[in-house]
Image (cartoon, grey):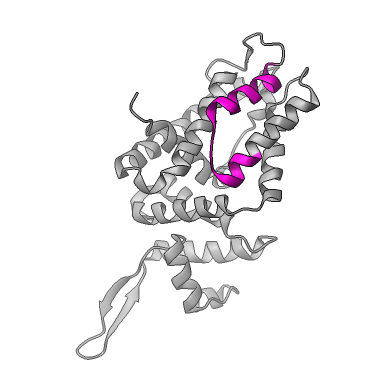
Amino acid sequence: MDSALEAGHPATPRLVTDWVRRGLLDEATPVGRGRAQGVQRIWPESQRRLFLILLKRRAQLPGKSLAPLYNIPVGVWLFWGEAHVRLAQVRRAMESWATAIKQRGWSSAGETARLSVDQIERSGATREAKDWLFEVVAGTLHFGDFDAAEFRDALSLVFDAADEGRVEGPEGARLSVDALTDLHAARYRALASLSRIPDDVYEVARSRYQQSIQEYTVRQPVFGADREIGELFQPRDLQSYLESTCLDLLTLLGLGDKPDE
């Protein structure tokens, strides 16, 4: 509390308790004060630093939603591991983030859906086709039910309007109807089963995340030069990664926790 006050972001015990419950902070370690003097709860230095970063970031947010904050502890774990953020905390943070995503209003879901459709859209798609895909994506975000067949049909009319089996993008980052459908299916599969995904799947996802960053750093110049979708592959720094770590981890969890065929 004193550190928060000194940093210009005063906090209350109630806020700390709430953030521990949500996974923004880890549970403290109880330490005895001595005979008949009760206990005090201690956090390691890494959690103190995390707390201050979260308070500063919260002050910068335009609204009251905590959803963007969950990227920070998840990102710390993905980059630096258990020495700074334990997996148990990450699991709470991911479930809290998922709840926040599911509870978003239709207008918020619509904004995300429109952005998704704009990224997928290719020339030749009709307004009706784009509106259908928008409704499918927004409905999935709002209600949480993903219909892969319906998504694929709607996506086909927008991404591959001429039904030519369109595939675009550089080798190693190819986009197609099947690839995009699999990607979205993985995300919603994980979103629906976060509490049941085993710890080892999380660990494998973390390893794959780190590997993907190394590969992207090496291949980004080639990806970015692609004439078709090069604008999707901009150089990235730590800050840009920390803006999407929950979504990135969700995707990897879904890809790594496929149901038995």
Residue 187: % across, % down: 50, 37
Q: Is residue 166 above or below residue 139?
A: above
Q: Is residue 48 visible?
A: no
Q: Was residue 113 drawn as part of the magenta stretch in this picture?
A: no
Q: Main secondary structure of the magenta part?
A: helix
Q: Is residue 156 visible?
A: yes
Q: Which residues are magenta?
A: 138-160
Q: Residue at x 22, y 86 (%)?
A: 34
**Image check: 37 left or right of 144?**
left
Q: Residue at x 37, y 34 (%)?
A: 257
In this orientation, which residue lies closer to the viewer: 174 or 22?
22
Residue 190: % across, % down: 44, 40
Q: Residue at x 41, y 46 (%)?
A: 194
In this orientation, which residue lies closer to the viewer: 238 or 23?
23
Q: Quadrant of residue 184?
A: top right
Residue 203: % across, % down: 34, 41
In this orientation, which residue lies closer to the viewer: 181 or 200?
181
Q: Residue furthest left?
A: 35
Residue 157: % across, % down: 69, 20
Q: Was residue 153 drawn as part of the magenta stretch in this picture?
A: yes
Q: Residue at x 68, y 36 (%)?
A: 135
**Image check: 114 left or right of 17?**
right
Q: Is residue 256 above or below residue 43?
A: above
Q: Is residue 184 above or below residue 240?
A: above
